[in-house]
Image (cartoon, grey):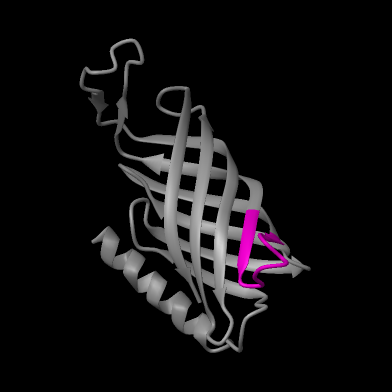
Amino acid sequence: MKISKLKYIATLLLMAQLASVHSQDYKKSVKIRPVDNYGLSFKQLTGFENGYEISLSKIEYGYRLGALRVFQKPAWPLKSDKLFFCYGYGVHLSAGDGYDIYNPFKPFSKPRKYNRTYLSAGLDGYAGLEYRLLKHPLTLNLDYVPNFEFFGPAYFRSNHVLAAGISV
């Protein structure tokens, strides 16, 4: 039921975005991450290759709503104008109905599972590569998002997310 709502919202956002698509050097984009930690992102560029990104992601037992300040630079300006290095920082809010806690002193033991609801705030880092197809309004993304959660189920938790996505 929750997945179908997420797909419905994704379809509506894509349709709204496609109405204003022209070419690259975009000001707005919608990113879909169809693999692990899947979700949707909306990016708005405010200055020259700088902007904001708001995302909604499905995590292991719940959802994460995040906001990032994004900076983009050409990765190899002399070789290609299609590949960009992206980096930034931000905050997020996670909510879920369960979580796992691992014991770092027993790396081969199974994690303890808890079925309790939680709400957790945190800080995010962001680094990624973006490949822009110049003839079509399409961008391929590979993102690495390390984040730290405070006040959550384990009081302090570090997560490392590697995600691939497609932007329109």
Is 65 placed left or right of 99 in the picture?
A: right
Is 60 placed left or right of 32 in the picture?
A: left
Most extreme residue toward the top is 105
Q: How many marks?
A: 0
Residue plotted at (51% across, 32% down): 149
The answer to which image quadrant residue 51 occupies is bottom right
Is 54 placed left or right of 72 in the picture?
A: left
In the image, residue 74 lies at what x, y percent? 69, 63
Residue plotted at (45% across, 29% down): 152
In the image, residue 110 lies at what x, y percent? 20, 22
In the image, residue 134 lies at what x, y percent? 59, 82
Residue plotted at (58% across, 41% down): 124
> In the image, is residue 60 above or below residue 35?
above
> In the image, is residue 96 above or below residue 85?
above
Classify the position of the N terminus by image quarter: bottom left
The answer to which image quadrant residue 132 occupies is bottom right
> In the image, is residue 67 above or below residue 13?
above
Most extreme residue toward the front is 79
* 12 drawn magenta: no
Which region is colored magenta?
A: 73-86
* 81 drawn magenta: yes
Please tell me which residue lies in front, 118 or 101. Answer: 101
In the image, residue 47 lies at what x, y percent? 79, 67
Please tell me which residue lies in front, 119 or 144. Answer: 144
Please tell me which residue lies in front, 98 or 40. Answer: 40
